[in-house]
Image (cartoon, rainbow, N blue to C red):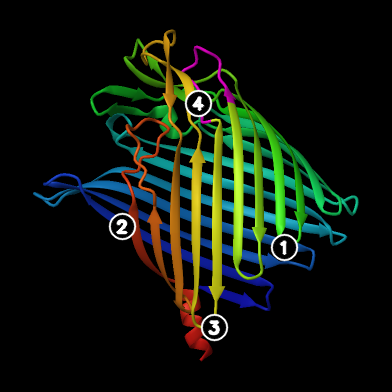
C-alpha cells in the first residue's frame, strides 16, 4: 500500500507471514512461524532536506505440535520492535550531512534457556555522517556512532573515515572503521543440553567485541572493464567463542585474546552491451590466533569465485542464465586433540574443493518468472564431513515460479 501527496510525503506499509511444519517424529511435528510488518514515512521537506521514519515488527516462533492430544506448545519466541529515523541535509548540492538513530526492543524466550526463561534487551544508537567533496577528485566520508545496550549497561563510541581520490580512470581508496558487537542474549544466558553429549552455558560476564579495521585499495575502470585490488588488516579484541570449562563440565561462551586477520582481495569484471557479463574474484586470508586460545585457525588461505551471466529480453519474453563457481584451496592446520585441553595438538590437512551452480530464468510475461537451478553440477561430495567442508550430498535440481504482484497487476491496470 502506498500513498503520495505531490511527491512530498510518502507512506509505505508491508506485512508478511511464514509457516512451515516439519514431521520430525511420528507423534510430534515441529512448527515454525514468522510474522513481520513495517511502516515507513518519507518527508521531502525542501529540495535539500528529507526525513525518514520507520517502524518494523518481527516475531519468529517455534512450537512442538502433539498429534495425540493436538496441543501446540511454543518453546521459542523472538519478538523485535525497532524504530529508525534518518535526516539528510545537502550543502551546495554536493556535501551531505546525515543524522539518525535506532531503537530496538529484543524479547527472547527459548528452550535453550533454563526453564524456558525469557529475557529482553533494549538497545539504541545515534549516528552522524558527513559526505564531503572538498575537491573535484577528492571525497571524504567521516562518521561516528554511539551505541547503548541495557544488558551490562554497555556504551561505545565508534568512529570511521573513508578517503577516495579519483584520477582519470583510476581511484585510490583508504579507510578505517572501529567495530563493536555486544554479546547476544543467547551468549549471555544459554543453558542447553547438546544432544546429551555436553552442555552449553552462557556467560553474563562477557565483554563486547571491538575491532580496528584498516584497508587500502586501488580501482581501475575503462569502458566495460573494472579491476580492483585491496589489502586489509583487522584486529579483533575480545572475540566471543566457546571453550570447555572443567568445573561446569561443558562448553561456556568466553572472550578470546586479540585476533589478527590480514589479506588481499582482487576482483575483475566485464560487462558487454549484447548482454554478457563476467566477474572473477580472488581472496587471500591469513588469521593469526595465539596458541592456547579456544580456537585454532582452519581458514582456507585461498578462495576464488567466477560468474558468467547472459541476459536477453524482448517485449513479452526474456531469459537469463548464470554460471557460478567457487574454488577453495586446501589447508593444513593444527587442531586440539581434546576440547577439554588447550595444550596438545595434532596436524590435520583438509583437501581443496570446488562447487559450481547453473541457473536459468525465464520471464514468461510481465511479473511472472520461472527459474531452473542446478546446484553442485559436478556432483562433489566430500569423503567425510568436517567444520569447513560443504554440507552437500551431491547434485540438486530445483524449479520455482515467482510472481511480482506489483508488476503483474500494474500491467492490467494500464490496459
The circle drawn on residue 169 is none
At horizontal 25% and vertical 47% (from top left) the residue drawn is 63
Q: At numbered mark 3, what does the secondary structure look like: helix, strand or loop?
A: loop
Q: Which residue is mark 1?
A: 50
Instruction: Find residue 308 and report its horizontal and vertical position in percent.
Output: 55, 57
224 relative to 315 in the view: left or right = right
Q: CA distance from mark 4 to mark 2?
A: 32 Å
Q: Is residue 222 left or right of residue 136?
A: left
Q: Tell me which numbered mark, 1 or 4, is placed earlier along the sequence.
A: 1
State the residue in front, 231 or 62: 231
In the image, residue 264 sits, relative to residue 65, either above or below, namely above
Compared with 66, 296 (above or below) is: above
Q: Which residue is mark 4?
A: 240
Within 10 angstroms of label 3, few (less than 14), some, or many (20 or more) residues?
Answer: few
Q: CA distance from mark 4 to mark 3?
A: 53 Å
Of circles 1 and 4, which is in front?
A: 4
Q: Is residue 269 left or right of residue 382?
A: right
Q: Earlier in the sequence, mark 4 or mark 2?
A: 2
Q: Main secondary structure of the magenta part?
A: loop
Percent x, y for residue 234?
65, 29
Instruction: Give residue 315's mark.
Output: 3
Q: Which residues are magenta?
A: 287-300
Amino acid at each position: 500500500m502506498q500513498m503520495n501527496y505531490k511527491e512530498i510525503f510518502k507512506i509505505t506499509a508491508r506485512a508478511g507471514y511464514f509457516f512451515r511444519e516439519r514431521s520430525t517424529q511420528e507423534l510430534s511435528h515441529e512448527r515454525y512461524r514468522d510474522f513481520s510488518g513495517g511502516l515507513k514515512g518519507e518527508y521531502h521537506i525542501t529540495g535539500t532536506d528529507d526525513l525518514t521514519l520507520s517502524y518494523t515488527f518481527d516475531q519468529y516462533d517455534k512450537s512442538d505440535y502433539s498429534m495425540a492430544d493436538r496441543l501446540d506448545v511454543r518453546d521459542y519466541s523472538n519478538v523485535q520492535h525497532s524504530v529508525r529515523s534518518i535526516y539528510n541535509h545537502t550543502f551546495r548540492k554536493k556535501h551531505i550531512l546525515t543524522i539518525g538513530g535506532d531503537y530496538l526492543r529484543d524479547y527472547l524466550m527459548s528452550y535453550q534457556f533454563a526453564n524456558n526463561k525469557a529475557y529482553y534487551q533494549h538497545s539504541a544508537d545515534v549516528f552522524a555522517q558527513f559526505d564531503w567533496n572538498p575537491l573535484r577528485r577528492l571525497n571524504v566520508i567521516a562518521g561516528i556512532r554511539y551505541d547503548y545496550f541495557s544488558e551490562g549497561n554497555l556504551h561505545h563510541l565508534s568512529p570511521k573515515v573513508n578517503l577516495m581520490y579519483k584520477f582519470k580512470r583510476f581511484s585510490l581508496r583508504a579507510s578505517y572503521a572501529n567495530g563493536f558487537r555486544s554479546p547476544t542474549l543467547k551468549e549471555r544466558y544459554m543453558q542447553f543440553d547438546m544432544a546429551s553429549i555436553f552442555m552449553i552455558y552462557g556467560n553474563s560476564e562477557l565483554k563486547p567485541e571491538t575491532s580496528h579495521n584498516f584497508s587500502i585499495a586501488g580501482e581501475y575502470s575503462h569502458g566495460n572493464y573494472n579491476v580492483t585490488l585491496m589489502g586489509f588488516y583487522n584486529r579483533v579484541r575480545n572475540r566471543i567463542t566457546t571453550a570447555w570449562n572443567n568445573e561446569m563440565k561443558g562448553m561456556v561462551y568466553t572472550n578470546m585474546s586479540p585476533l589478527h586477520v590480514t589479506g588481499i582481495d582482487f576482483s575483475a569484471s566485464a560487462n558487454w552491451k549484447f548482454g554478457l557479463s563476467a566477474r572473477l574474484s580472488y581472496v587471500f586470508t591469513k588469521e593469526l590466533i595465539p596458541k592456547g586460545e579456544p580456537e585454532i585457525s582452519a581458514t582456507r588461505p585461498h578462495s576464488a569465485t567466477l560468474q558468467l551471466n547472459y541476459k536477453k529480453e524482448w517485449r513479452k519474453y526474456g531469459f537469463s542464465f548464470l554460471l557460478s563457481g567457487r574454488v577453495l584451496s586446501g589447508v593444513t592446520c593444527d587442531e586440539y586433540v581434546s576440547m577439554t585441553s588447550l595444550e596438545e595438538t595434532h596436524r590435520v590437512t583438509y583437501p581443496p574443493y570446488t562447487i559450481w551452480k547453473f541457473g536459468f530464468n525465464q520471464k514468461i510475461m510481465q511479473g511472472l518468472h520461472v527459474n531452473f537451478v542446478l546446484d553442485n553440477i559436478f556432483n562433489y561430495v566430500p569423503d567425510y564431513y568436517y567444520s569447513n567442508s560443504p554440507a552437500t550430498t551431491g547434485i540438486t535440481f530445483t524449479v520455482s515460479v515467482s510472481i511480482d504482484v506489483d508488476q503483474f497487476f500494474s500491467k492490467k491496470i494500464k490496459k
